[in-house]
Structure formats: structure tokens, C-alpha cells
Image (tube, rainbow, N blue to C red):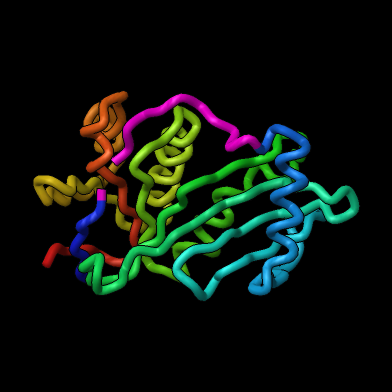
Amino acid sequence: MQVMVSVSMPELIEDTSFDLDDDASRKELFGKLTNKASVERIGSYKGLEFYASGRNSNEGYWFLLNKRGNDLAYVCRFVTLGASSMQFKTKVVTQIAVWRNYNYAESRAFPAYVFFRMLLPKYGVVMSDSQQTNDGRKFWQSRMLDALHKGLFVYTFDQNTRDLTRLHNTDDIDDAAPYLWKKEPKFRTRRVLISQTKLTLD
């Protein structure tokens, strides 16, 4: 599989809840998501309802609901990068916002479930966002370790230098951390790629 990236890796930013720790904001988003024309029920997960919106478009949401309480337990907003205007050789998906409601212990393992059972099988490659909180950094480091254990392909990529480097083990992941995450805008061009197949640059 070939991929050519022309988008801007993670600059560390302050932690954020995307305003979803606020009950009113969460209820508002609950209403917007459940009223979207493209919303579809995927199934249930540990007693909660699993939905998707915009699954077949270039952006959308995966979310987990407590329908009895009209409440959100988890939200993932995603965008796909792969149109000819972006010069990608394969479609890549990026999670641009991931939030979990800590009131629901059931949602603890759900972000990894969405990553490996929903996003990666559908798109083949999941790429990190250009800005991440400390929680986002921990999330990606965990997914990188999970991916290695699953026999998947893990890479770092620098947009400016077009340096694509495969990470083979936990030592490689530890060594890559200072290269990937710092509180400087230049780190926005550095990304993590997790792929089902080996990647090469065009």
C-alpha cells in the first residue's frame, strides 16, 4: 500500500474536555447527534447503545449513549484524508476529538475497541492528529503498543522531511516519544500511522 501525505504530528496542548464535562453542552451534542439524518445504530456495548453518524462520508462520529438518561458515554469525531486534492494514495482516517465520560466505567475500553474494531478495519490506516493533550499522547502510546502486539505496522512520519520510519518494538516507541510530542508548533507535522499493511511513500 502506498501513501503520500501532504497535511500537517502532535504538538502537545493543554488538556480539554471539548466542553463535554458540562451537562448542558453534553445534552446539546446528544440532541444533535441523535437527530442527524445519517445516524445508524451499530449495536450495544456493555449495556450502552453504540451509534455512528456519517460513516460513509468524509467526516462523522462514533458515539456511545445511555439512552435512558439521554447522556453521552463516549464521542469520537473523525475525518478521512484521501481525496485526490490531498494527494493520498490510500484513504487514511484521523480522530480529531476523542472524549470519554468517566461516569461510565463501561466506556473505559471503548476507545481501543473503536480504534481496532471499527476505524482500522474500515480505513486500513489510522493517523494521529496534529495537536494532542497529554491524555491524547497516552492514548496513542497505548495504541502503538497494542498495534505491535497485534502484528500491525506502526510508523512515525514527518510531513516536512517525508521521513517514514517503522517502529518495531517498545524500545522504538520509547525512543520516538521526544521526536513526536513537545509543546512547539513544529511538532504538528509529525504523526503516528498505524496500518494493517506495510506502507511505502510514492
Residue 151 position (above or below residue 102) = below
Quadrant placement of the C terminus: bottom left
Residue 92 position (above or below residue 38) = above
Residue at 62% of width from left, 50% of height from top? 75
Apparent side of residue 152 relative to residue 60 in the rendered image (left or right):
left
Residue 156 position (above or below residue 120) = above
Q: Residue 196 in the image: state x and y as whole percent.
A: 35, 65
Q: Residue 198 in the image: state x and y as whole percent.
A: 24, 64
Residue at 46% of width from left, 68% of height from top? 121
Residue at 44% of width from left, 60% of height from top? 79
Q: Residue 74 in the image: state x and y as whole percent.
A: 66, 47
Q: Is residue 196 visible?
A: no
Between 166 and 43, the one nearer to me in the picture: 43
Residue at 79% of width from left, 55% of height from top? 48
Q: Is residue 183 visible?
A: yes
Quadrant placement of the N terminus: bottom left
Between 139 and 62, the one nearer to me in the picture: 62
Apparent side of residue 31 relative to residue 18 in the rendered image (left or right):
right
Q: Residue 89 in the image: state x and y as whole percent.
A: 23, 71
Between 79 and 124, the one nearer to me in the picture: 79
Between 51 and 14, the one nearer to me in the picture: 14
Residue range highlighted in magenta = 8-19
Q: Is residue 16 magenta?
A: yes
